[in-house]
Amino acid sequence: MQSMKAFRSEFQPRNDDILLTSFPKTGTTWLIALCHNILSLDDDGKEEDDVLKKMNPHELAPPLDVNFLSDQVQDLLLDPGRSNSGCKIVHVARNPKDTLVSMWHFYNKILKPDGPFPVERAVESFCSGVLPWGPFYENVVGYWEESNRRPKEVLFLKYEELCRYPEEQVRKLASFMGRPFSSMEDGDAEVGKVLRYSSFNRLKELEVNKNGVWELHRLPNNTFFRKGTVGDWKSYLTPQMAERIDQLTQLKLQGTGLSL
Ligand code: A3P
């Protein structure tokens, strides 16, 4: 809480900062890798030089709010040019049932309780908004509305669209970041490279993500790579649970124009 309070009162972005603001388990790891690989294209590097071979994506973009007082984040913020003059924000949203199931797996793995936390209780806490990082719907609707108000500054992506239309979505992300790809063949090749280098299968199989640890949070890197698919909730939620979440989703998103 101290760190978050300090972040809220003291953080000053640079106007070329890009903040990634997604709710946990909605695709943050993927988004960081995509942004990193878009920005690294100019380096003309070989695969063996890819920093993602040595670091879990989160080490490249540590959560600023919870780590604001840590040395790592303070070092990151030491550069000049911080003036609160605005920056860009990218948000990735995900289907609520898949987000919930992903979060349930994640906390079961890292907290290692005696057996898994009952999924009924996970559903209950998701629906009541009492869960790590607060209520899901209020978070996502806030960014959705802001992206409609300020489309040049806030980009709203969806995990499912990234899975379904990866080339189109990566082009959109890169243009938003001010690094558009050419519409010619070389642009297509670059998009392909970014997607390949950021892909779930590649990252999951890297030694650093199989056996490495993210020291800042003492978390095994493999906890960020589980299945990486759409609709896995069907294996864990009963039809009644799904119905309850769907009704809540409908209620919370009513009138916003957003569907998840
Ligand atoms: P699952 O638990 O459904 O597999 P976050 O990165 O916000 O913590 O979200 C984690 C979810 O994104 C997990 O979903 C994880 O497997 C998936 N994920 C991680 N890296 C990915 C990638 N490169 N491509 C697609 N999905 C990825």
Image (tube, rainbow, N blue to C red):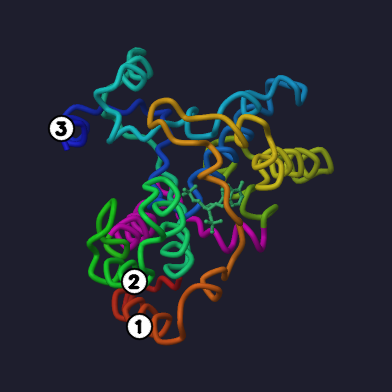
Is residue 149 shown in magenta?
A: yes
Direction from residue 183 to residue 227 in the image, left or right: left
Q: Nearer the viewer, residue 258 or 64?
A: 64
* Residue 253 point in image, percent of width and height: 33, 74
Gap between marks 2 and 3 measured at Cα = 29 Å
Amino acid type indicated by mark 2:
Val
Q: Which residue is mark 3?
A: 2
* Residue 235 point in image, percent of width and height: 55, 73
Q: Earlier in the sequence, mark 2 or mark 3?
A: 3
Q: Quadrant of residue 80?
A: top left
Amino acid type indicated by mark 3:
Gln
* Residue 75 point in image, percent of width and height: 35, 14
Q: Are marks 2 and 3 in contact (CB under 8 Å)?
A: no
Q: Which residue is mark 2?
A: 123
SS state under label 3: helix
- Tell me what residue is drawn at x 47 percent, y 59 percent: 102
Give the dominant element type of the magenta stretch: helix, strand or loop: helix
Vertical position of residue 186 compared to residue 134: above or below: above
- Tell me what residue is drawn at x 40 percent, y 50 percent: 24
Q: Which residue is mark 1?
A: 244
Which numbered mark, 1 or 2, is in the foreground of this view? Answer: 2
| Residue at the limit of the structure toward the right, as seen here | 185
Q: Nearer the viewer, residue 79 or 248?
A: 248
* Numbered tag placed on residue 70 in the rendering: none
Q: Residues within 10 Å of mark 3 (few under 14, many from 20)?
A: few
Cβ of mark 2 under 8 Å from ligand 1: the answer is no
SS state under label 1: helix
